[in-house]
Image: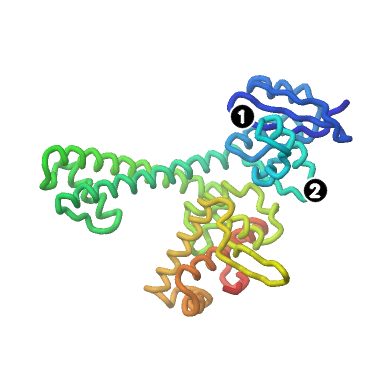
């Protein structure tokens, strides 16, 4: 019997295969070692291959597409309901095989190597920012124990770290001086690495047409533009800007029943990193509205007059997400008067 659909459950070293024919009968069910995966699919005639979207799924999808197979990636949360009982690799592969054939299933576009390279910079940058914050907070806490206060702000803390590394030891015991000096040097090293990553992201942004167009949106900088350009492989998979905003978790959570509509807070589903970048970018616009009200969009000024600041920030992030979708799908740049006005 000819295999028409395969569910492939990925692992670090063992991969589970579940294949069926056109009638849905199980044709093959076996485990493969990593070195056996590509030879197996090389011998297998062209078929539909379903894979859960995970850390290595885009690599394997590209490899199988190169072998002329049709590959579809699916969010793991949408595959889980098809697992009949228990949690095994074989059950997961069977569930993937069934889910990939569902007409209402939503799929994830396969990312290119360049997109994943850009995302690796973002992941590393996000980690280093957290580590720098932890070290600076540790410095503040240790010096505060001896009555030394570091003024608020990252630049003030880094300035203090430079002075300590250059030899201006604070008035603390020698043992504490050594520890604070180590933390200061590590904070400066992390800051230097972050600046280098930012420069690399700026170079990537200039080489990406999508990222350059996204940079025209107010509140979207090089980091946000490159993150969206690298993460969203195909914006056309979303039917509308609202669906794109929902994918980012920026739409209200619905708890409606019995003909009554109840809207709660935003769902916070989807990519947390992209949502954070949008919120941070819109927060910068809110701050600009406070100090330079004449330079902001009248819609934002009216929204801030009616709603709390955080509610307005989230509403702006929702609106920006829809603009991002429109720009990515239509190949245009941002134009101030063409954004749809949304209810807060």
Label 2 to label 1: alpha-carbon separation: 27 Å
- Where disc 1 sits, the SS reads loop
- Tell me the tag on residue 103: 2
Vertical side of 243 occupied by 337: above or below = below
Vertical side of 172 occupied by 330: above or below = below
Left or right of residue 326, residue 303 in this image? left
- Where disc 2 sits, the SS reads loop
**How many numbered markers are drawn?**
2
Tell me the quarter of the picture where residue 332 sits.
Answer: bottom right
Which residue does the image show at 50% across and 51% down from the upper left? 273
Of 324 and 43, which appears nearest the observer? 43
For the C terminus, the quadrant is bottom right
Which residue does the image show at 43% across and 64% down from the upper left? 284
Q: Position of residue 27 (x, y in %)?
A: 83, 27
Of 77 and 85, which appears nearest the observer? 85
Mark 2: few, some, or many residues within 10 Å (few <14, many ≥20)?
few
Vertical side of 156 occupied by 301: above or below = below
Left or right of residue 135, residue 220 in this image? right
- Tell me the tag on residue 139: none
Which residue does the image show at 70% across and 52% down from the upper left? 237
Mark 1: few, some, or many residues within 10 Å (few <14, many ≥20)?
some
Residue on which disc 1 sits: 11
For the N terminus, the quadrant is top right
Q: Position of residue 68 (x, y in %)?
A: 76, 31
Tell me the quarter of the picture where residue 112 sits.
Answer: top right
Q: Position of residue 176 (x, y in %)?
A: 16, 41
């Amino acid at each position: 019997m000819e295999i028409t659909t395969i569910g492939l459950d990925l692992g670090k070293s063992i991969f589970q295969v579940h294949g069926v024919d056109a009638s849905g009968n199980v044709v093959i069910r076996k485990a493969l070692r990593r070195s056996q995966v590509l030879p197996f699919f090389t011998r297998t005639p062209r078929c539909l291959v379903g894979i859960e979207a995970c850390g290595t799924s885009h690599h394997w999808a590209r490899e199988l597409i190169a072998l002329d197979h049709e590959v579809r990636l699916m969010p793991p949360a949408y595959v889980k309901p098809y697992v009949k009982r228990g949690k095994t690799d074989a059950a997961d592969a069977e569930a993937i095989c069934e889910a990939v054939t569902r007409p209402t299933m939503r799929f994830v576009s396969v990312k290119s190597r360049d997109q994943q390279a850009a995302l690796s910079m973002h992941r590393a940058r996000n980690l280093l920012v957290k580590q720098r914050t932890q070290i600076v907070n540790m410095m503040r806490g240790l010096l505060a124990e001896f009555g030394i206060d570091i003024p608020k702000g990252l630049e003030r803390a880094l300035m203090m770290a430079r002075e300590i590394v250059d030899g201006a030891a604070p008035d603390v015991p020698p043992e504490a001086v050594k520890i604070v000096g180590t933390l200061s040097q590590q904070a400066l090293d992390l800051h230097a690495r972050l600046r280098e990553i930012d420069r690399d992201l700026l170079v990537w942004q200039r080489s990406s047409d999508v990222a350059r167009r996204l940079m025209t949106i107010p509140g979207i900088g090089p980091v946000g533009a490159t993150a969206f350009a690298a993460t969203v492989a195909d914006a056309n998979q979303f039917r509308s800007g609202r669906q794109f905003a929902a994918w980012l978790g920026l739409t209200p959570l619905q708890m409606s029943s019995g003909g009554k509509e109840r809207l709660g807070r935003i769902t916070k589903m989807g990519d947390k990193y992209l949502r954070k970048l949008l919120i941070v970018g819109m927060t910068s616009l809110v701050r600009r509205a406070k100090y330079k009200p004449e330079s902001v969009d009248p819609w934002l000024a009216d929204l801030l007059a009616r709603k709390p600041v955080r509610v307005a920030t989230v509403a702006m992030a929702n609106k920006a997400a829809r603009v991002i979708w429109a720009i990515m799908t239509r190949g245009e740049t941002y134009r101030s008067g063409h954004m749809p006005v949304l209810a807060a």
